[in-house]
């Protein structure tokens, strides 16, 4: 420490416990400490991901989002995010914009936005909705993406009486190519369903692109996916015992597309989930 300067000493706190120590109540960290460490951990994760971020065309370069883009009609809303149509002011280009409010965003979800942006920025494929730009502002995150004017596959299935064999084949081929590209690049989407497959136009029934990488994660080694996520009506019930096979997940999407019914009724899904989490698997 220099005279009149700051104390530059640092401390390392080892909070790891042995098995015997962990069993003793007096070694438990207070809940407030745990929350603090979680927040610090997520901040560190964001800082590390930020180092890997590519250089975006206009985002994070001084100008605000609203100086460059105009928000138009809302397309859909969620708990923390809203997707709107948008227009690039300088060029008139029509885009889709995912707006994520930061005010009530939990630290884990806040850090997850960085993962989603980094994953989307790394995926350049004709059947994956591309990320065009990204803005990080005090109140919101803005993800600028290609606008898919045909809506999602879920709604299209509801409007059509049936899919021709040719259209069904073309649609499935595109979906498999997109998933294979993700897997070849060490990325698992983790939420494949008709709502996350977007169509290019109202006239084309089979040109789709994969979207919504909010649950996506990088896979660094085999059998490393243990987080339970996804949509219950489309996730295989085996998923709750950490046995994951893409073909079954894909099958759930295909089943819905062909017969316009969920692969499993709601009462069966809830019953099987309860059975699995209760360790009464009953698998035959």
Image (tube, rainbow, N blue to C red):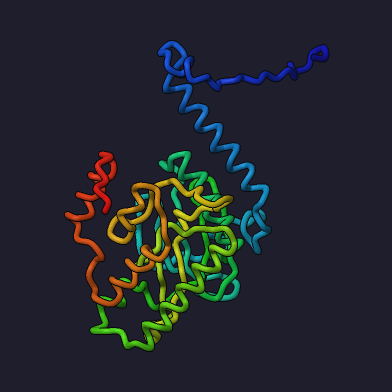
> Residue at horizontal 75%, vertical 19%?
8
Of the pair 117 and 236, the residue shown nearer to us = 236
Q: Quadrant of the C terminus?
A: bottom left
- The residue furthest front is 284
Residue 198: give x, y in percent of width and height. 41, 72
Residue 247: give x, y in percent of width and height. 40, 66
Residue 117 vs residue 25: left or right? right
> Residue at horizontal 47%, vertical 59%?
189
Of the pair 144 and 93, the residue shown nearer to us = 144
- The residue furthest left is 267
Residue 50 visible in the picture: yes
Above or below, comparing residue 169 to residue 79 in the picture: below
Above or below, comparing residue 270 to residue 153 in the picture: above
Residue 66: give x, y in percent of width and height. 53, 59
Q: Which image quarter: residue 267?
A: bottom left
> Residue at horizontal 79%, vertical 14%?
1
Q: How many marks?
A: 0
Q: Which image quarter: residue 254?
A: bottom left
Residue 30 vs residue 270: left or right? right
Residue 196: give x, y in percent of width and height. 39, 66
Residue 74 visible in the picture: no
Above or below, comparing residue 43 to residue 252 in the picture: above
């Amino acid at each position: 420490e220099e005279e009149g300067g700051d104390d530059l000493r640092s401390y390392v706190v080892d909070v790891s416990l042995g098995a015997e120590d962990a069993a003793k109540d007096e070694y438990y960290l207070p809940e407030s400490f745990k929350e603090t460490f979680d927040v610090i951990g997520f901040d560190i994760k964001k800082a590390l991901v930020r180092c890997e971020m590519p250089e975006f065309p206009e985002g994070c370069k001084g100008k605000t989002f609203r100086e460059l883009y105009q928000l138009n009609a809302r397309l859909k809303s969620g708990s923390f995010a809203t997707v709107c149509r948008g227009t690039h002011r300088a060029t008139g280009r029509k885009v889709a914009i995912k707006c994520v409010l930061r005010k009530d965003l939990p630290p884990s979800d806040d850090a997850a936005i960085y993962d989603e942006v980094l994953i989307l920025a790394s995926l350049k494929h004709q059947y994956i909705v591309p990320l065009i730009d990204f803005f990080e502002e005090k109140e919101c995150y803005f993800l600028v993406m290609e606008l898919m004017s045909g809506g999602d596959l879920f709604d299209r299935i509801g409007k059509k009486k049936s899919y021709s064999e040719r259209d069904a084949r073309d649609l499935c081929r595109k979906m498999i190519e997109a998933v294979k590209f993700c897997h070849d690049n060490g990325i698992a989407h983790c939420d494949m369903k008709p709502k996350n497959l977007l169509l290019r136009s109202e006239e084309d029934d089979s040109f789709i692109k994969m979207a919504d990488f909010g649950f996506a994660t990088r896979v660094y080694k085999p059998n490393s996916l243990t987080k339970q996520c996804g949509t219950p009506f489309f996730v295989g019930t085996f998923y709750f015992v950490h046995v994951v096979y893409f073909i079954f997940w894909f099958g759930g999407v295909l089943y819905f597309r062909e017969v316009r019914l969920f692969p499993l009724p709601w009462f069966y899904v809830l019953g099987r989930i309860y059975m699995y989490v209760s360790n009464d698997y009953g698998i035959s």
